[in-house]
Amino acid sequence: MLDVDNFKSINDRFGHPVGDEVLRQIASCLTKTARESDTPARYGGEEFVVLAVDTDLAEGLVLAERIRAALKTITLHVDFQSIHPTASMGVACLRRDESFEQLCARDDAAMYLAKNAGRDRVIEST
């Protein structure tokens, strides 16, 4: 799960059309970076998920770091300024007898730990 860092300030500073373009660029980057077996999706607002089937936690962390690095290649130029969006990410693996909602809650908590630790990073779920 990933959340675009400082997205509200992008919308407030540059307007919603620019924020929408940031989201489109991130969605495109996720599609290009994800493996063929992965399913990237917008989760809501400025949050995205990548469902990675048959992937353990170590592989999930590698995938998340690859996505984080790929996001660094995004640059939007607006009014003689450059926007370089980043994202904070949480990585979790589905546990036996765990619901999808429980998985998402753990992943969301890890993502917010990444935000609170300084943003633009990946944290694994506990």
Image (cartoon, rainbow, N blue to C red):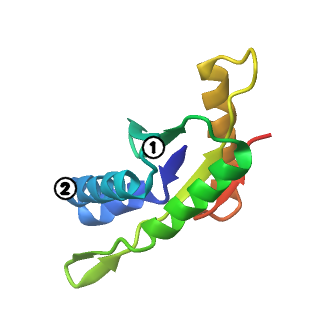
Q: Quadrant of residue 66?
A: bottom right
For the N terminus, the image quarter is: top right
Measuring 68% from the left and 28% from the top, which residue is drawn there?
Answer: 94
75 to the left or right of 54: left
For label 2, the crowd category at 10 Å Cα-Cα, with few meaning under 14, some 14 to 19 and many 20 or more, is: few
Element class at badge 2: helix
The kind of residue on which mark 1 rests is Glu
Measure how far apart labels 2 and 1 are at the Cα level.
17 Å
62 to the left or right of 48: right
69 to the left or right of 99: left
Q: Quadrant of residue 126?
A: top right
Q: Mark 2 = which residue?
A: 17
At which x and y percent is residue 108?
A: 62, 38
Measuring 47% from the left and 60% from the top, which residue is drawn there?
Answer: 6
| Residue 44 visible to the viewer | no
Q: Quadrant of residue 62?
A: bottom right
The kind of residue on which mark 2 rests is Pro
Q: Residue furthest bottom?
A: 80
On residue 47, the disc is 1
